[in-house]
Image: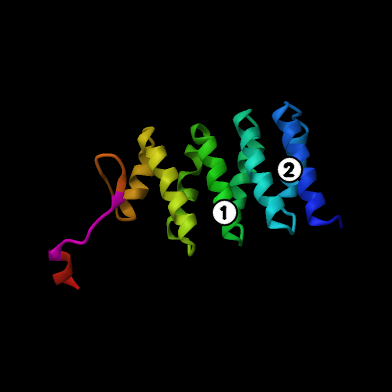
Amino acid sequence: SPLPSTRRQAVDTLAGMVLGGDEGLVGELLLALHDQDPQVRETSVLVLAEGAKQGHPEALAGIKNCLLDPLPDVRVSCLKALAQVHGVVRGLTSDVGLLLRDGESEVRRRSKELLVRLAQYGDTAASAILLRNGFVPGSAEWREMEASPRDALLV
């Protein structure tokens, strides 16, 4: 198999072609999501965001599948990619919500940011997920609900 850097360069080349409108390359990028090199998967996810913006539902499905990647950096890349295409993410709101409980703080932070953005655009499912997970709307941002003194007495 080619060196990881060679595979990453190939993904970068595919990225340029997808951005140029070569629709057949979305399939190649979907295959790259299964590469053993996490940087190849990360790059592929970010490029697939462009495919999703261009209306390729399979690109969005590929990004969704990588939300469960074992490596947090790949999950973060998925959330970054979904943030770029937030207009078509509504069907993935519950998948993003699951990452609020991820073991990695950066994944949790990115998940919350995306859900907040969706809530601000009127996605009631995103608002409900945030509320169920202890976030409340603030003046400018959703914030974690603070425990009240009464809650401390209930412990």
Residue 138, percent from left and from top = 25, 43
Residue lying at 41% horizontally and 39% vertically, measured from the top left: 117
Mark 2 nearby-residue class (10 Å; few <14, some 14–19, many ≥20): many
Q: How many marks?
A: 2
Give how far apart the Cα atoms at labels 1 and 2 are.
16 Å
Residue 1 higher or lower than 52, as above or below: below
Residue 136, percent from left and from top = 27, 48
As drawn, the residue found furthest toward the bottom would be 155
145 falls in the magenta region = yes
Residue lying at 45% horizontally and 60% vertically, measured from the top left: 105
Mark sitting on residue 75: 1
Residue sitting nearer the eye, 60 or 9? 9
Mark 1 nearby-residue class (10 Å; few <14, some 14–19, many ≥20): many
Quadrant that contains the N terminus: bottom right
42 falls in the magenta region = no
Q: Earlier in the sequence, mark 1 or mark 2?
A: 2
Left of 126 or right of it: where is 6?
A: right
**Residue type indicated by callout 2:** Leu
Left of 101 or right of it: where is 70?
A: right
Quadrant that contains the C terminus: bottom left
Residue lying at 24% horizontally and 40% vertically, measured from the top left: 139
Residue 125, percent from left and from top = 38, 42
Residue sitting nearer the eye, 117 or 55? 117
Answer with the quarter of the image where residue 22 lies: top right
Residue wearing tag 2? 29
Q: Which residues are magenta?
A: 143-150
Answer with the quarter of the image where residue 30 lies: top right
**Residue type indicated by callout 1:** Arg
